Amino acid sequence: MILAHNGTLWDHRSLWREADTDTQAIVCWLSHHWQPRTTEGLIGTLRELLGKAHDHTALDLLLSARGYLYTFCCYSRDLDYYTLWYRKNDGRVAIASEPGTGAWKPISNRTLLAVDPHLRLSLCKV
């Protein structure tokens, strides 16, 4: 599993007591709880995560596992700052925190974007 995180989780020790940082807590917690490693399994795990992580600016995540790319947009403040966007064209998918020129689409708050190995996209509310 590969993880990138944006935002601050102030109560990160509620996820993983030994973690020095919020990102470390998130990756340790997800590595332990995300079972099965499927899109459906991730949706359930993210719902559980949101039940435990109460004090955060954002839990914007970029994850990669088993050939899938996942982007989770979840913010509780600074709504213009923590936005995420995606674009698919020419056999590529791009994810960005700021839209560039062209047909960028926003990822709604508390929404998971899943990109499968064939670059098929699905959006799921969490």
Image (cartoon, rainbow, N blue to C red):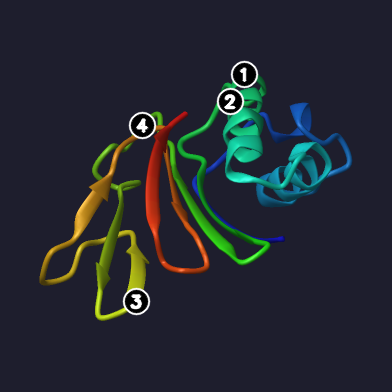
Q: Amino acid at mark 2?
A: Arg
The furthest residue to the right: 18
Q: Amino acid at mark 4?
A: Arg
Foreground mark, 2 or 4, reads 2
- In 3D space, how far apart are the residues under numbered discs 3 and 4 (Cα atoms)? 31 Å
Q: How many marks?
A: 4
Residue highlighted by disc 3: 92
The residue drawn where x is 41% and y is 36% is 124
| Contact, mark 1 vs mark 2 (Cβ under 8 Å) | yes
Nearer-N-terminus badge (3/1): 1
Query: Could you say where residue 111 lies in the image, as x and y percent from the top left?
Result: 40, 37
Query: Could you say where residue 85 lies in the image, as x and y percent from the top left?
Result: 28, 56
Foreground mark, 1 or 4, reads 1
- In 3D space, how far apart are the residues under numbered discs 1 and 2 (Cα atoms)? 6 Å
Circle 2 residues within 10 Å: few <14, some 14–19, many ≥20:
few
Nearest the camera: 39 or 85?
39
The secondary structure type at the circle numbered 4 is loop
Nearest the camera: 11 or 74?
74
Nearest the camera: 90 or 21?
90
Quadrant containing the N terminus is bottom right
Residue highlighted by disc 2: 47
Residue 73, labelled with which disc? none
> In the displayed structure, does residue 75 sit left or right of residue 4?
left
